[in-house]
Image (tube, grey):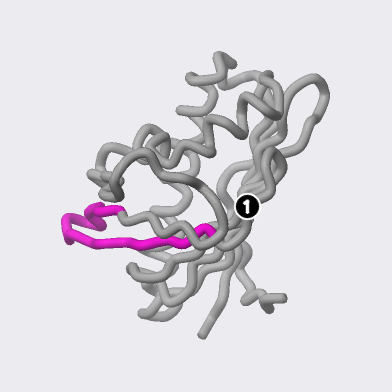
Amino acid sequence: MNVRQLNTQLWVPQSLKTVFAFFADATNLETLTPPWLNFKVLSPQPIEMKPGTLIDYQLKLHGIPVRWQSEISAWNPPYAFIDEQVKGPYQLWHHRHLFREHEGGTLVCDQIDYAHLGGNWVHRYFVEPDLKKIFNFRHEKLREIFTISSSEGADSPAEPATQGHALP
């Protein structure tokens, strides 16, 4: 399995508590996901976020309907949580959401280890461009939600590592 890594970060001018509370509501993932994915949270509301919580979604990848189930494997408010794909399109999806106070606001960091079928050409022409678009959309939405212009804030574009990454 060829494990890759995607790392992004975005600074928002809101308190750690406010930003974490937004991410702690699983339904906000619908807002942060591009419309072209037709993403919907299927799990009954409200969803209690804690280790072991399972969340079911549906989406469309290149027009193909996909079901996804993730598990919250770690929950450390207001600093971090981890979701891992249980069922879905990836061989591996391990997403660390990290939050820390920074320069009067909050730095939102995403660290994702992922693997998929199909080899390098599938990654280069489908997976990598899709992930970049998804996380760039996510950053734009977060800017709108937390009322910052795209010229403000220190962020890094969604740039996956090109090498495989060993998991801890």
Q: Is residue 84 above or below residue 159?
A: below
* Residue occupying the point 41% across, 59% down: 54
Q: Nearer the viewer, residue 136 or 23?
A: 23
* Residue occupying the point 32% across, 40% down: 45
Q: Quadrant of residue 46?
A: top left
Residue 6 visible, this orientation: no
Q: Helix, strand, or loop for circle 1?
A: strand
Question: Left of 64 or right of it: where is 95?
Answer: right
The region drawn magenta spans: 57-72
Verify whether residue 93 appears in magenta. Answer: no
Question: Left of 66 or right of it: where is 121?
Answer: right
Q: Residue 160, image x and y in percent? A: 58, 59
Q: Residue 33, image x and y in percent? A: 37, 40
* Residue occupying the point 18% across, 59% down: 65
Q: Residues within 10 Å of mark 1 (few under 14, many from 20)?
A: some
* Residue occupying the point 62% across, 58% down: 74
Q: Nearer the viewer, residue 39 or 159?
A: 39
Q: Residue 85, image x and y in percent? A: 44, 66
Q: Is residue 140 above or below residue 26?
A: above
Q: Which residue is mark 1?
A: 75
Q: Is residue 108 above or below residue 93?
A: above
Residue 88 visible, this orientation: yes
Q: Residue 36, image x and y in percent? A: 25, 42
Q: Quadrant of residue 51?
A: bottom right
* Dominant secondary-structure state across the stretch colored magenta: strand
Question: Left of 117 or right of it: where is 77?
Answer: right
